[in-house]
Image: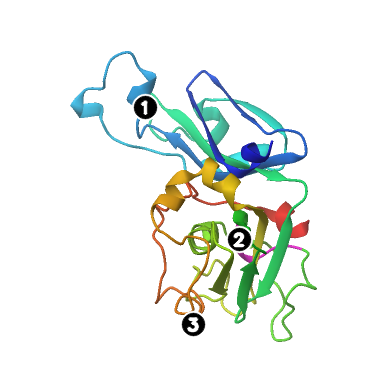
Amino acid sequence: YLSRIITSHSAHACDGQPLRLHCPRHSTISIQSAFYGSGQAWLCRADPPLGAHNHSCSAFTALQKLLSECQSLRDCQLPVNHLLFGKDPCPGTAKYLHVDYKCKPTEHKRHVVCEGETMILRCKPPRVLNIYAAVYGRSLGQTDTCPSHLTRPPPFECLNHEAVHLVSKSCYSKQKCIVAVSNQTFRDPCFPGTRKYLSVVYSCVPQTLLREADPYIFSTTSSPTVDTEKDLEEPFSKGSRRPDNSGAMMSNSLLTYAYIKG
């Protein structure tokens, strides 16, 4: 069970096939990324594609659809076809759905920090951080969270789901991490003047278990779980050690209103 809720999972299905996501008891699905299109749709065909048709297309609604259909469930099954995502991104071309997800345990921690402040996450040794969700912005109905006396909150949610890239790369597998909560660190998803916050869902897991589940992260450095004083001198921001979007966590985006609401 522990290894199941620590590791990242993926599911893949071609047009006409069902795609199933599943998590064990006492855990729920947390969507990390979703792609529907023809990027590597040749995997779905018996014959490789002709050069003239070897182009990529994708449905921009894929992530939001998976969030609305499967987020926070234990089991989710979807029929894969373009009707699920609205307009067909490339008619006549074979397409597939690929989803990365994690199983978020019922017992988890959530930390919210307002814009302009610094988020510090820490675990007591020998446990290390495992990030399940992160979002930057403002959700509906959260007037008591980081209230602003200057402007009224917008009548709709504005959330940057890509925040998980930065938080995961900065904090995953460490005992302590520091993240600057600002527009310099995260892309601003809201109208000017909107006060935002960073909400992170995480847990502290045994280092030995994480090492077994993700040996790669520990093979890249001799001291992966302890930040040096130099690392902690300044909060992580866009101008210093911002990671790219191709980090060890196969994360693209996640966290919906339910996460902040919860």
Residue range in magenta is 134-140
Question: Which of the two labelled residues, at mark 2 and mark 3, occupies the earlier sequence position?
Answer: 2
Q: Amino acid at mark 3?
A: Glu
Q: Amino acid at mark 2?
A: Val
Its colouring scheme is: rainbow
User: Magenta stretch containing residue 70, yes or no?
Assistant: no
Image height of 66 relative to 78, above or below: below
Residue mark closest to the camera, 3 vs 1: 3
Dot 1: within a 10 Å radius of its alpha carbon, few (fewer than 14), some, or many (20 or more) residues? Answer: many
Question: Which of the two labelled residues, at mark 3 and mark 1, occupies the earlier sequence position?
Answer: 1
Q: CA distance from mark 3 to mark 1?
A: 46 Å
Q: Is residue 194 left or right of residue 55?
A: right
Dot 2: within a 10 Å radius of its alpha carbon, few (fewer than 14), some, or many (20 or more) residues? Answer: many
Q: Is residue 251 left or right of residue 24?
A: left
User: Where residue 105 sits: x, y (%)?
Assistant: 72, 45
Residue at the disc numbered 1: 41
Quarter occupied by residue 1: top right
Residue at the disc numbered 3: 233
Question: Which of the two labelled residues, at mark 2 and mark 1, occupies the earlier sequence position?
Answer: 1
Q: Residue at x 53, y 19 (%)?
A: 17
Q: Amino acid at mark 1?
A: Ala
On residue 135, the disc is 2
